[in-house]
Image (tube, helix red, strand yellow):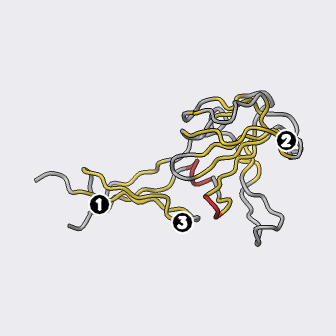
Amino acid sequence: MGAPDVAVVGASASGVLGAREASGGTARDRGRTALWGWPLAGTPAVVHGFDPPEQRWSAGHRGIDLAGVAGEAVLAVDDGVVTYSGTIAGVGMVSVTHASGLRSTYQPVADRVGRGTRVARGDGLGRLGEGGHCVLQACLHLGAVRGRDGYVDPTPLLMGVELTLLPVEG
């Protein structure tokens, strides 16, 4: 008898991230997997966390700020297509739409790739720009947008979610 079929399910505070059927493994197999790679080299410190507004139109922090060095490469967190590359309120910004339906946003970014560019996880999108809203050091603001639902916390996408393999009834 072969290994049982299992379902792989990941969840975060923002809801179920995905499920798929797989062969192999047991119900006790567990692990952590990150859905996104880090947008700066290494594992940068989170200097300001996600703090969503109570209402969509209210003030809040719709992403996380990662410590960086002005001029360092800003990297795509996953495969996708650049759907925006330009400036908003004088700040350079890039948005990448991913096959999962999520969109990653990055700012401030200088020397940006062009709109329509296909990128793979880890490809350069530009350079970390000066300015932005971090006072003491350069930082990258990373956002995660799910369709019309709006911004979700990107932290679980970067840090990984615990995966639990469960037997598939059948």
Residue 61, image quadrant: bottom right
Label 2: element kind? strand
Q: Position of residue 147 (x, y in %)?
A: 61, 58
Q: Name the residue that disc number 1 marks.
A: 27
Q: Is residue 59 above or below residue 115?
A: below
Q: Residue at x 56, y 40 (%)?
A: 80
Q: Position of residue 64 (x, y in %)?
A: 72, 51
Cβ atoms at labels 1 and 3 below 8 Å apart: no
Residue 79, image quadrant: top right
Label 1: element kind? loop
Q: Earlier in the sequence, mark 3 or mark 2?
A: 3
Task: Determine the CA span between mark 1 and mark 2.
Answer: 48 Å
Q: Residue at x 50, y 55 (%)?
A: 161
Q: Name the residue that disc number 3 marks.
A: 15
Image quarter where the C terminus lies is bottom left
Q: Earlier in the sequence, mark 1 or mark 3?
A: 3
Q: Residue at x 72, y 54 (%)?
A: 63
Whether residue 86 sits left or right of residue 32 in the image: it is right
Q: Residue at x 61, y 40 (%)?
A: 38
Q: Position of residue 120 (x, y in %)?
A: 54, 33
- Please name the amino acid that badge 3 sits on: Gly
Q: Position of residue 86 (x, y in %)?
A: 78, 38
Q: Residues within 10 Å of mark 2 (few under 14, many from 20)?
A: some
Residue 91 is labelled as 2
Label 3: element kind? strand
Cβ atoms at labels 3 and 2 below 8 Å apart: no
